[in-house]
Amino acid sequence: MHSKLHGLDAGLHRRLVDSLYVEAMVMADEARAYFDRAGAADREALEPMARILFSCESLKVTTRLMHVIAWLLAHRAWQRGEIDSDALADERFRLGEAAATEADGISQFPFPARSLINASMDLYDRVARFEARMLAGRSGAPGDARSPTHALIDRLARSL
């Protein structure tokens, strides 16, 4: 394995991917448990159109999480040497597109549903930023080293 992946230290990459993977798997389990059990009763308490939106949002949560998990699994495969850096940058290993959620549309949902929806969006957004950072490092984007985010990542890598 190379010491850097698209401008990111391999050790930091491994720790970030492992942490995100655990978070994604726990969230997927929580979402399945909620939407399959407790969420069913919450869904039935909603108005008919809100029930449809609730079902759509549960699918969006699942889709977001599956995109994140697939992306993380590809990065774990890279860590194990099963795919190389060039393959990892290929479109087929990129984070898939996920449908957006309108905050107004879910405002009447019970707290557990809103919490899972918002958490899945947050996780997806963090992974998308992680991917963007790596792709920017790969292309050698100008100003890359001066970015406050990149400086923070570099400081984190040095401290770990």
Image (cartoon, grey):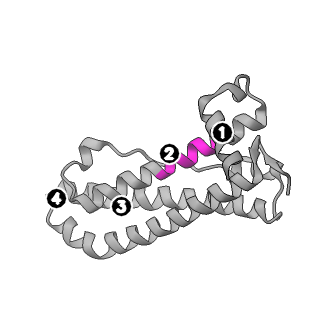
Q: Which residue is drawn at 70% across and 58% down?
A: 14
As helix, strand or loop, the secondary structure at mark 2 comes to helix
Q: Name the residue under label 2.
A: 125
Q: Mark 3 points at which residue?
A: 58
Is residue 51 rendered to the left or right of residue 9? left
The answer, for residue 56, to whether it is visible in the render is no
Q: What residue type is labelled 3?
A: Ser
Q: Which of marks 2 and 3 is nearer the N terminus?
A: 3
Q: Which residue is drawn at 56% across and 57% down?
A: 68
As helix, strand or loop, the secondary structure at mark 4 comes to helix
The answer, for residue 40, to whether it is visible in the render is yes
As helix, strand or loop, the secondary structure at mark 3 comes to helix
108 in the magenta segment: no
Q: What residue type is labelled 2?
A: Asp
Residue 27, image x and y in percent?
Answer: 44, 65
Residue 156, image x and y in percent?
Answer: 64, 45
Q: Which of marks 4 and 2 is nearer the N terminus?
A: 4
Q: Are marks 4 and 2 in contact (CB under 8 Å)?
A: no
Q: Mark 1 points at which residue?
A: 133
The residues tagged by marks 3 and 4 sit, at their Cα atoms, a distance apart of 16 Å
Residue 157, image x and y in percent?
Answer: 69, 47
Q: What residue type is labelled 4?
A: Pro
